[in-house]
Amino acid sequence: IEVIIGAVNNLSPGLKDAKGDLERFSAQATATGAVLTTFAAGAAVSLFAIAKSAANVGDHLRDLSIQSGVAVEDLSTLRVVADQNGTSIDSLAQGLKFLSRNAAEASGGTGAAADAFKRLGINVKDADGNLKPVKQLLFEAADGLKGMSNETERTALQLAIFGRGGIELTEIL
């Protein structure tokens, strides 16, 4: 029995040390878990905000697509160009809406819009006699306007093709 009591007495300080180590490890693990939980929650909130923002942009582009007749994918690309040139996507979409309407009017061959397209050398119809897509007409109008040296005439043509918002599109065109 003395041997057993002696062994237990020799073992007790080691067990007490091990118990203390385990308690410290447990406290550190709990603190680390709290930090990781906080980090994960913050990351989730950030990801949600990014996803919500992307969804809002997508919804806005869809609405502008309906108004302007330009595909959402094309508006997304044009949005980058507009942002780089200090123009809002809303101004661009408004101009595209007028471009679409004025191209339809010009397809009859008469009116101020028809004259404006002709002065820029633009036929609003394709080889099959169909109205060209708005995106194609935008690029053709931009090319035609870039070649103009007379700013007054350029502004008049922008207004005739893109409406009042055409002035805001000057940096893009």
Image (cartoon, rainbow, N blue to C red):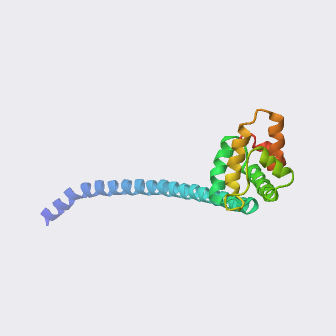
> In terms of image quadrants, where is residue 32?
bottom left
The answer to whether residue 172 of the structure is visible from this angle is no
Residue toward you, 45 or 7: 45
On the question of residue 102 being in view, the answer is yes
Q: Which of 151 and 53 is in front in this view?
A: 151
Q: Between residue 3 and residue 104, name the one nearer to us.
A: 104
Quadrant (top left/top right/bottom left/bottom right) for the N terminus: bottom left
Percent across and percent down for residue 133 are: 69, 58
Question: In the picture, residue 121 is in which quadrant?
Answer: top right
Q: Residue furthest bottom?
A: 1
Q: What residue lies at 80% left-to-right and 49% top-to-bottom?
A: 161
Residue found at the far right of this picture: 111
Looking at the image, which residue is at 72% across and 46% down?
A: 141
Q: In this view, does 171 lie to the left or right of 46?
A: right
Residue nearer the viewer, 17 or 113: 113
In the figure, is residue 133 to the left or right of 4? Answer: right
Residue 70 percent across, percent down from the top left: 69, 58
Q: Position of residue 39 (x, y in %)?
A: 51, 54
Residue furthest to the top in view is 149
Question: Residue placed at 81% from the left, 43% from the top?
Answer: 157
Quarter of the image with the C terminus is top right
